[in-house]
Image: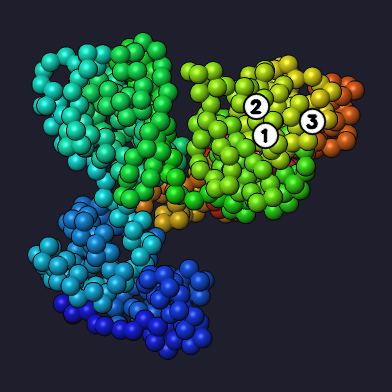
Amino acid sequence: MAKPQKYRLGELLVQQSLVTTAQLEEALVQQKLSGRKLGRVLVELGLVTEESISTAIANQLGIPYRDLRSQEVDAKLVSLLPETMARRFRAIVLADQGRSYLVGMADPSDVFGFDEIARALRRDIEVAVVTEGQLIAAVDRLYRRTNEISGLAQELQQDLGNAYVDFGQGLDVGGEEAPVVKLLQSIFEDACQIKASDVHIEPQELRLQIRFRIDGEMHLQTEVDSRIGPALVLRLKLMSGLDIAEKRLPQDGRFNVKVKQQSVDIRLSTMPTQYGESVVMRILAQNSGLLDLNRIGMPEDMLNQYRRMIRHPFGMILVTGPTGSGKTTTLYASLSELNSPNTKIITIEDPVEYRLPGVSQVQVNDKIDLTFARVLRSTLRHDPDVVLVGEMIDQETAQIGVRAAMTGHLLLSTLHTNDCASTPARLLDMGVPQFLLATTLLGVIAQRLVRVICASCKEEYVPEPIEQNWLRQELGPQGAIPKLWCGRGCSHCNGSGFAGREAVYEMLEMTPELADGLNRQGIGEFTRLARQQLIGRSMRTHAVARVLAGHTTVAEAMRVSAQIDD
């Protein structure tokens, strides 16, 4: 068991020609101003990567470097070191070597951490270097709270006893140390750690089912006694300011929680079911950072076209797709690009999902008749340059929005349609006059999310016959099927073979030909011309391109295409 050695990071990086002396001096100045570690400053300045720093340290100390993105890690082995120590000392147990454990550390010179880890593991340890970013991601992924949640659920069950709980009678849910509070806090922490987008609490006949939606797929977190369901619902209603006595009707609300010093907004919806009230909570991390247009995955030619479109002084741009297809991300990335001191932006949303500095954001409230249409009508008297309407939800909102786009405002909104070509037909069904639509609609974006193959377990595979036939139809009879990839499943992706999602797009710009076709010959001719314009530029084409680039699988591209064809 070799003790950690001290080193001077700046001198080490200069010696190995990773940075120059001038760059190091610049970084040291920034370090004094910010108080952050030198390595973090160098990475933020773009002078060096975390991986190159870790490799340089490993070479200097004569110890191995481990890339956690490609190394399979045993969750049971990792759990030998308490989570608090793993986060405090930036360490993770990588392997059982018999007489010693191999421990990955972001700072292998930490003598105190080395001794504390060895004492906790009760065995000699050998050190490998890992990057801090990869280590934190691994800790978030591997230290799940399943056992803790089950234990707290049992504690709550014992606290409630065998009595039937009617939350309309005002069950005492206690203070911050009450089991129900600790259980909910653990659920939120676990969901945020694994980047779940939604938490589902679903009462069944004999059990209460808690599931997370991760990368668009549902995953069972735990099943507990159904008797604790009403206590959870009551507490959530109190936190959301909902009517705790009303259990016959659906209710919507929101609240804010702190998870590891992060502010997280929870959007909550309740619904009465056969065995009690079901709850779905959408998790919105306020400081997760908004994507800009360069990072949303739109093809470069389409992105350039879209940028020209959103710079138009007036007109309407719609983003379409089902719930959970990334429409809000696209709209907020657009607003971030348009946001400047000389541009007045007002948003009307239900709810306000992200806070955008410098933008006036309004949340509708049907309880006091603060509807989309009413707020939009008032918004136009506040002299905005750009208006975002969360959704074209009804006929009145659509008609006011189109008239706003015609009178000198750029209006961005969403609509639930399958593709770009069918969007104008939906607006006509909502009562928008045909001549207004032809003159105000600038363009439509349709999008879906496909799952991305896990980089840690990515491997070549031979597609199924049905996948080969589908791909040949897309590539043409002469097109050869290239090398294809999938994820076999590993600890990094919880065995799914996928890690993260990315968007696939299609965009239809309202050209003079399309506007004339809609205005003179009606929706049938417009749809024909629109589908012609989209040949080779459709969402299906973009999905195939993601497959050929090795980002996703044929099955995912087929799933997206099936949604479009429905």
**Where in the figure is residue 504, as x and y percent of width and height?**
61, 43
- The residue type indicated by label 2 comes to Ser
Task: Out of 19 and 473, give the one closest to the viewer.
Answer: 19
- Residue behind mark 3: 406
**Label located before the other in sequence (3 or 1):** 1
Pointer 2 local density, CA inside 10 Å: few below 14, some 14–19, many at least 20: few
Q: Which of marks 3 and 1 is in front?
A: 1
Say which residue label 1 marks: 382
Q: Disc 3 vs disc 2: which is toward the camera?
A: 2
Residue found at x 69% / y 50%:
342
Quadrant assignment, res 66? bottom left
Give the CA separation, mark 3 to mark 1: 16 Å
Residue on which the image places disc 2: 378
State whether residue 523 is above or below residue 192.
Answer: above
Residue appearing at x 39%, y 79% in the figure = 56
Mark 3: which secondary structure? helix
- 428 up-or-down from 286: above or below: above
Can you give x and y, in whole percent of width and height, for residue 122 in the image? 9, 65
How packed mark 1 is, by other alpha carbons closer than 10 Å (few <14, some 14-19, many 20 or more), is: few
Quadrant in which the N terminus appears: bottom left
Secondary structure category for the residue under label 2: helix
Q: Is mark 1 on a helix, strand or loop?
A: helix
Residue at 26%, 59% (x, y): give it.
Answer: 87
The kind of residue tagged 1 is: His
| Residue 396 appears left or right of 169 | right
Q: In which quarter of the image is residue 147?
A: top left
